[in-house]
Amino acid sequence: MECYKFNERVVWDSGFGYEIGYFLDEGNSDDTWLIDIRTGLITEPCSRSKSEVYKYTTELINKLTAKYGYEKRFSELF
């Protein structure tokens, strides 16, 4: 199981698309993480299945961009 630090960049891959955000803590229900989603329609903290949350990496974003046909990235400028 992945270990995350508070405010670490993460990716939520639902299987239908993906969003990026920040890790906060354990989720509100069993087997979930609380993440602060920063893209998409819901941009607030919410619990997501631990099996759908991954560390944010350039390689993962490239893979998901190819899979879903769109790109979401954190800015490297700020």
Image (cartoon, rainbow, N blue to C red):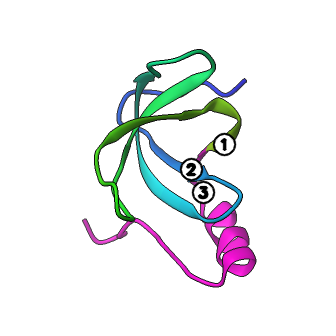
Residue under the image location 45 percent in, 27 percent down? 5
Q: Are marks 1 and 2 in contact (CB under 8 Å)?
A: yes
What is the span of residues highlighted in magenta in the rendered image?
54-78
Q: Amino acid at mark 2?
A: Trp
Location of residue 63 in the rendering, given as x and y in whole percent from the top left corner: 73, 70
Asked if residue 30 lies left or right of residue 44, the reply is right
Task: Indicate whether 14 appears above or below 32.
Answer: below
Q: Earlier in the sequence, mark 1 or mark 3?
A: 1
Assess whether residue 72 is covered by the magenta stretch: yes
Q: Which residue is mark 2?
A: 12
Which class describes the residues within 10 Å of circle 3: few (<14), some (14-19), or many (20+)?
Answer: few
> Distance between the Cα atoms at labels 1 and 3?
15 Å
> Distance between the Cα atoms at labels 2 and 3?
12 Å
Nearest the viewer among 19 and 76 is 19
Q: Are marks 1 and 3 in contact (CB under 8 Å)?
A: no
Residue under the image location 55 percent in, 51 percent down? 11
Q: Nearer the viewer, mark 1 or mark 3?
A: 1
Q: Which residue is mark 3?
A: 57
> For numbered disc 2, what is the local secondary structure?
strand
Location of residue 19 in the rendering, given as x and y in whole percent from the top left corner: 49, 59
Query: Which disc is residue 15 wearing?
Result: none
Q: Which residue is mark 1?
A: 52
Q: Amino acid at mark 1?
A: Glu
Total tally of numbered discs in the picture: 3
> For numbered disc 3, what is the local secondary structure?
loop
Q: Earlier in the sequence, mark 2 or mark 3?
A: 2
Nearest the viewer among 61 and 39 is 39
Residue under the image location 74 percent in, 75 percent down? 67
Figure quadrant of the C terminus: bottom left
